[in-house]
Amino acid sequence: MEKIIEDILLYLTMWIQANVLTWSMVAQWLCAGSAFFLALIFWAGVTSRIKKWTDKHVSGDLANSALNALIHGGNLVLFIILAQICAAVFVGMDKNPQVLNALSYLAVAGIVIRLLTGLMTNRTLARWVTIMVWTIAALHIFGMLSPISKFLKGLSFSMGKGDTFTALGAIKGVLLAALFLQVASLTVQFVTKRIERNADLSPSLKVLTVKTVKIVLFTAAILFSMSSVGIDLTSLAIFSSALGVGIGFGLKTIISNYVAGVLLLMDNSIKPGDTIEVGSVFGVVHDMHGRYTSVLTRDGMEYLIPNELLITGEVVNWTYSDKNVRLKIPVGISYQSDIELALKLLEKVHEGVDRVLDDPHPASRLVGFGDSSVDLQLRIWIADAEKGVTNVRSEVLLNIWKLFHKHGIDFPFPQREILLKSDSALTVKIEKDSDK
């Protein structure tokens, strides 16, 4: 055992002396160190100027992330240029610049990592990309990348009739799928911000456009990644048609909800921000999704209403064409009260209630004669039904109570008079207390 250890140590010593402790290696390390410090010093002076220019002329999170990645990797680009100039000198001297080439490969890997991870919002995915790039760079430097690639390429798998793909192709497909999906995600974010800033588009059209872009880009990313593995996409046509039939029968309700969601976004009948009433649900449309629409009520509860119900059922859209909404508040007064005075007072009760509009002006009407009261009605307008209507009614009714009591307008209560006929069989017995 000791003999084997001694032989290994002797081999390592001889290899280091022959490949590391040589004047050529020392010179390459000195050149690499000098190139690195020169690139670092030069780029430190340039970085501040580039950042000032980008702050003035570049806008957007995606563009800023890409430029920041380029700025932070600029010193590595300059190092690669200087290192390759030194490597050309060593080649001219019939020396192998393996140290300079290896460090250049590592610098390229660092640039790729900074570019990719700088654009990725998913930190876990960015960490895996970093490990993968460093691994590929290390295998390439030590000359192991080509043998491993040949080995993986020799491992083939069959899928269906005549469809074969290799382990190397599968790995490439997974990596490309991750790359394509990340690019699609970044593109969706960029397009979404552009669409949301466009004031010419309606809210529902914005939602429809964003969802369409998402579906198209992510579908294209998946198809491209499958094609890169070697899977024949035409072979999926029969399978997809059979799957479509199964989905049509088994997921009928879900599909109808998705179709209804698209129709709602296209016809613009309901859009985010609208105040709607569906059955007993009254609230503001918070968001619209493919399968359902979320409605946020004044109680803080969010109802997820299936889109099919909004298409087939009765929906009251309080703000469909105009945000102004009229509220009718019934008021009853006694028959002995001054009706004309009460009508005039009703048109003043909105004073002090900020949410009641002056134009159209509140109006009071005599609508009928009830059993115990004269029935009046106050009609007021508001422009923010999404903030609730009960609170406005409460403020107005409180003002009515104060004004009517101040001016002697009485509120009636139910009264009944009983008339006894002389020939009625009903007798009234009156008991008197006996004197004690």
Image: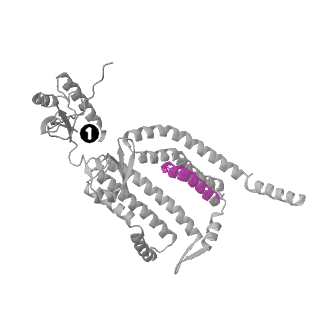
Give the x, y percent position of residue 254: 39, 63
Colour mapping used in the image? one colour
> Among all residues in the image, which is located at the extreme top?
436
Along the horizontal axis of the image, is 268 left or right of 164?
Answer: left
Rendered position, 252 above or below 27: below
- Residue 255 can be seen, yes or no: yes
Give the x, y percent position of residue 310: 30, 56
Quadrant containing the C terminus is: top left
Quadrant containing the N terminus is: bottom right
- Most foreground residue, 383 or 301: 301
Q: Residues within 10 Å of mark 1 (few under 14, many from 20)?
A: some
- Most foreground residue, 67 or 363: 363
Q: Does the magenta segment cover residue 126?
A: yes
Give the amino acid type for the residue marked by disc 1 in the picture.
Asp
Q: Does the magenta segment cover residue 391?
A: no
At x 62%, y 74%, the residue is 154
Q: Which residue is mark 1?
A: 384
Give the x, y percent position of residue 423: 14, 40
Rendered position, 266 above or below 418: below
Along the horizontal axis of the image, is 296 left or right of 352?
Answer: right
For numbered disc 1, what is the local secondary structure?
Answer: loop
Along the horizontal axis of the image, is 16 left or right of 128?
Answer: right
Give the x, y percent position of residue 211: 36, 57
- Most foreground residue, 346 or 340: 340
> Among all residues in the image, which is located at the extreme bottom?
161
Q: How many marks?
A: 1
- Residue 261 can be seen, yes or no: no
Chief SS of the magenta region: helix
Extent of the magenta region = 109-138
